[in-house]
Image: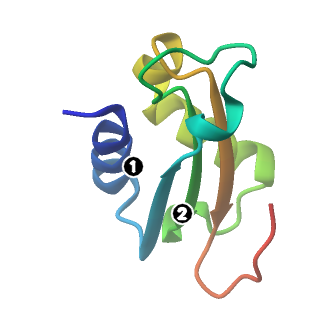
Amino acid sequence: MSIRDQITSKLSEGLSPTSLAVHDESDQHRGHGGWREGGETHFRVEVISESFAGKSRVERHRIVNALLAEELAGRVHALAISARAPGEGSGR
């Protein structure tokens, strides 16, 4: 299973999101720190979940980071997170 699929699976199971997008942006970081041949090192996630209602941005990021701790300790070098509750405006 690809890292992208692992991230999608863990966030889906852990957050029951109403919307989830996982983007592999590794190709944009070729030659930069943390980049490796084969990609799957730099990701952007956009997730909307009731789990984030009433939580600060820092709390939301901690939730996502905890769910993806194994991936972040391994191959994933960078993770950009947009985490919102349903009905909130977009923001990064």
Mark 2, residues whose alpha carbon is within 10 Å: few (<14), some, or many (≥20)?
A: many
Residue at position x 52%, y 23% from top? 76
Q: Is residue 65 above or below residue 44?
A: above
Residue at position x 60%, y 62% from top? 52
Report the front residue among 51 and 25.
25
Residue 28 as seen in the image, left or right of residue 65: right
Mark 1, residues whose alpha carbon is within 10 Å: few (<14), some, or many (≥20)?
A: many
- Disc 2 versus disc 1: distance between alpha carbons? 8 Å
State the residue position of label 1: 11
Colour setup of the view: rainbow
The mark nearer the N terminus, 2 or 1, is 1
Q: Is residue 6 above or below residue 36?
A: below
Report the front residue among 67 and 76.
76
Element type at mark 1: helix
Residue 15: x %, y % from top left: 40, 56
Residue at position x 68%, y 58% from top? 82
Residue 45: x %, y % from top left: 56, 53
Q: Image quarter for residue 1? A: top left
Q: Quadrant of the C terminus?
A: bottom right
Q: Is residue 46 above or below residue 44?
A: below
Q: Image quarter for residue 7? A: top left
Residue at position x 59%, y 43% from top? 25
Q: Is residue 45 above or below residue 58?
A: below
Hey, what amino acid is under mark 1?
Leu
Residue 12 as seen in the image, left or right of residue 75: left
Hey, what amino acid is under mark 2?
Val
Which numbered marker is on residue 47?
2
Element type at mark 2: strand
Proximity of marks 2 and 1: CB atoms separated by less than 8 Å: yes
Residue 29: x %, y % from top left: 69, 31
Report the front residue among 80 and 87.
80
Residue 36: x %, y % from top left: 53, 14
